[in-house]
Image (tube, coloured by chain):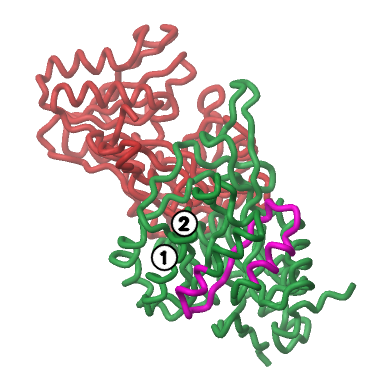
Chain colours: A red, B green
């Protein structure tokens, strides 16, 4: 659906990373973990296109005024990387933005008996909080958060408040273990002997490594991808990614926005 | 009184002059949730080839100020899958569906035109001549009047449906191209297709698009498109569909003044999926406000 959302808050949560809360219509409460929104940053033609953001959280907004009605609200977590996100970070509470969403295919929650291992790299954590919120209702959940430095480790306390056990790894060792987050993931998998499923979002290199780890152990693994997209609804075909049967002769492209952004890791062609 | 918004293109009667442009509206169904397809004049489906095409590697799109570059590489499901999977939806919508198509030889174009001709759900054909002719050293059909004539003539022989030719702006003389297409039997011309452009990442010293170059579209190209529509409208006696950076009703009406009978909305649909519907509504409101009884009275009504 397309709607005008009012910004409720917009704050920097870590250097360069922002969290924005926006109002939404009633139907938005049905948004699934892993789905995303397309945000029109300004009404002008520069920036021209909407920007895609994973839905970090869906909650209920209780207005302060007496007699006002409750309504759904949602959060996006974003990194300022260019003109569009810089403009987004300059918006204030009560500003209106045009939203398209919730869009795309979200995560499958899977069987309640397995332990759920969530892996997030940097701002890749964005679609994983709402997922964790759902998963803790039925299974033990562990989060593996990785980044270059401590500044890239976001919103860990929020996950801890859900009862999620969190492991942190940074490449420079400024927070948690020094190294890659996949090392801690492997240790956990060795301990639980494969009785787990993985949910991951982050840089392509990290997702590739996680998919490899899951495949080796025959563990279910879902990944959420990013893509350069213009429309978000499967029309522009800008955001495609190679599928598992992809080759130059027999092309197999999947549309990240409409067929994803969440894919079973087996569906994708990682070597392409 | 409500203004008369109907227009006529090559025997097709449209409820209003606003269409969606090929490649920006999927096969129609993708947008059905956001747009009332029965409030727009017509919609043009994603360009079709005989065989499915994978398209280019990514990144395929990049935004630049006031516009975007795309190098999708004509990814499409191919004519067989189109007939099996996409045509049934077209049957459910009471709005003309125009099939855009392309080939790499005149024979391929002709074969596609023949196959599309037999589909009752298709109201008209739009032929994309901005493709390289593999039999003639890769020269783009739409940049050489002789090549353009041959390919349009081949399509003309294969179909009795209205035949629209979509012109490339990447030419020295767009009027010569338009004339060649008219001589070959086109019923209407749509212009402009995207302008070839590129974008560079300074720090990486690399092109941003995997394909290096791409097609430039969006509001930044509107002045060029308007100029070309105006030039062609003065020189060629065929109905014209104006395309190029149309974001709102004002833009659309400017194209009509310049000589277009109808318009296509492209990049704007990416930003607002219901852009075409909104533009049609706003055009009607403009006519009402300005006491213009029919949109047809504005076609080519530019005073200069």
Please provide the residue range marked out in magenta.
Answer: B154-182
Residue furthest to the bottom = B1
State how far apart marks 1 and 2 are (Cα): 8 Å
Query: Is there CB contact under 8 Å for labels 1 and 2?
Result: yes
Assess disc 1: are there few (<14), some (14-19) or many (≥20) residues with their C-alpha within 10 Å of its C-alpha.
many
Q: Is residue A208 magenta?
A: no
Task: Check the residue under mark 2 and report the chain it is in.
Answer: B
Q: Where is mark 1, residue-wise?
A: B112
Q: Is residue A59 visible?
A: no
Which quarter shows the N terminus of chain B?
Answer: bottom right
Residue B34, position as x, y percentages in the image: 46, 65
Q: Residue at x 59, y 25 (%)?
A: B206
Q: Is residue B158 magenta?
A: yes
Q: Residue at x 45, y 48 (%)?
A: A237
Task: Check the residue under mark 1 and report the chain it is in.
Answer: B
Check residue B103 in the rendering and tell me which mark sits there, or answer none. Answer: 2
């Amino acid at each position: 659906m397309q709607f005008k959302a009012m910004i409720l808050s917009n704050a920097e949560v870590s250097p360069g990373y922002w969290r924005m809360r926006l109002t939404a219509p009633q139907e938005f409460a049905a948004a699934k973990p892993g789905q995303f929104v397309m945000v029109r940053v300004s009404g002008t033609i520069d920036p021209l296109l909407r920007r895609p953001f994973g839905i970090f959280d869906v909650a209920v907004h209780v207005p302060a005024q007496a007699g006002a009605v409750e309504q759904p609200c949602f959060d996006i977590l974003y990194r300022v990387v260019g003109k569009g996100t810089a403009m987004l970070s300059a918006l204030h509470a009560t500003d209106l933005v045009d939203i398209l969403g919730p869009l795309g295919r979200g995560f499958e929650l899977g069987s309640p008996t397995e332990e759920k291992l969530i892996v997030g790299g940097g701002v890749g954590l964005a679609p994983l909080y709402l997922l964790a919120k759902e998963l803790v209702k039925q299974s033990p959940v562990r989060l593996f958060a990785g980044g270059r430095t401590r500044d890239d480790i976001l919103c860990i306390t929020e996950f801890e408040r859900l009862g999620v056990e969190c492991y942190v790894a940074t490449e420079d060792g400024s927070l948690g273990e020094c190294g890659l987050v996949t090392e801690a993931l492997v240790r956990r998998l060795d301990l639980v002997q494969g009785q787990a499923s993985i949910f991951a979002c982050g840089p392509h290199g990290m997702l590739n490594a996680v998919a490899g780890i899951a495949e080796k152990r025959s563990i279910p693994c879902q990944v959420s991808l990013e893509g350069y997209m213009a429309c978000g609804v499967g029309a522009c075909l800008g955001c495609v990614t190679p599928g598992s049967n992809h080759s130059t002769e027999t092309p197999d492209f999947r549309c990240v926005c409409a067929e994803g952004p969440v894919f079973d890791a087996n569906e994708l062609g990682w070597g392409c | 009184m409500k203004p008369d918004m109907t227009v006529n293109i090559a025997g097709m009667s449209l409820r209003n002059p606003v269409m969606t442009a090929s490649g920006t509206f999927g096969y129609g169904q993708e947008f059905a949730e956001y747009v009332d397809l029965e409030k727009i004049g017509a919609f043009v489906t994603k360009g079709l080839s005989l065989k499915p095409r994978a398209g280019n590697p990514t990144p395929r799109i990049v935004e630049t100020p006031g516009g975007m570059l795309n190098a999708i590489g004509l990814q499409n499901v191919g004519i067989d899958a189109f007939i099996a999977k996409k045509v049934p939806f077209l049957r459910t919508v009471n709005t003309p569906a125009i099939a855009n198509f392309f080939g790499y030889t005149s024979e391929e174009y002709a074969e596609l035109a023949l196959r599309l001709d037999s589909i009752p759900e298709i109201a008209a054909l739009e032929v994309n001549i901005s493709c390289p002719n593999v039999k003639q050293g890769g020269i783009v059909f739409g940049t050489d009047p002789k090549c353009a004539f041959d390919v349009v003539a081949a399509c003309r022989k294969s179909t009795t449906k209205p035949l629209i030719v979509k012109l490339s702006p990447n030419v020295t003389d767009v009027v010569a191209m338009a004339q060649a297409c008219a001589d070959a039997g086109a019923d209407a011309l749509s212009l402009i297709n995207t302008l070839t452009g590129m974008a560079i990442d300074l720090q990486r010293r690399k092109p941003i698009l995997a394909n290096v170059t791409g097609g430039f579209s969006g509001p930044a190209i509107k002045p060029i498109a308007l100029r070309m529509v105006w030039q062609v409208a003065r020189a060629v006696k065929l109905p014209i569909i104006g395309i190029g950076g149309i974001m709102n009703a004002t833009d659309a009406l400017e194209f009509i003044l310049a000589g277009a009978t109808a318009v296509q909305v492209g990049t704007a649909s990416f930003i607002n999926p219901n852009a075409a519907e909104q533009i049609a509504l706003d055009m009607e409101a403009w006519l009402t406000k300005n006491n213009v009884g029919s949109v047809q009275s504005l076609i080519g009504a530019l005073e200069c």
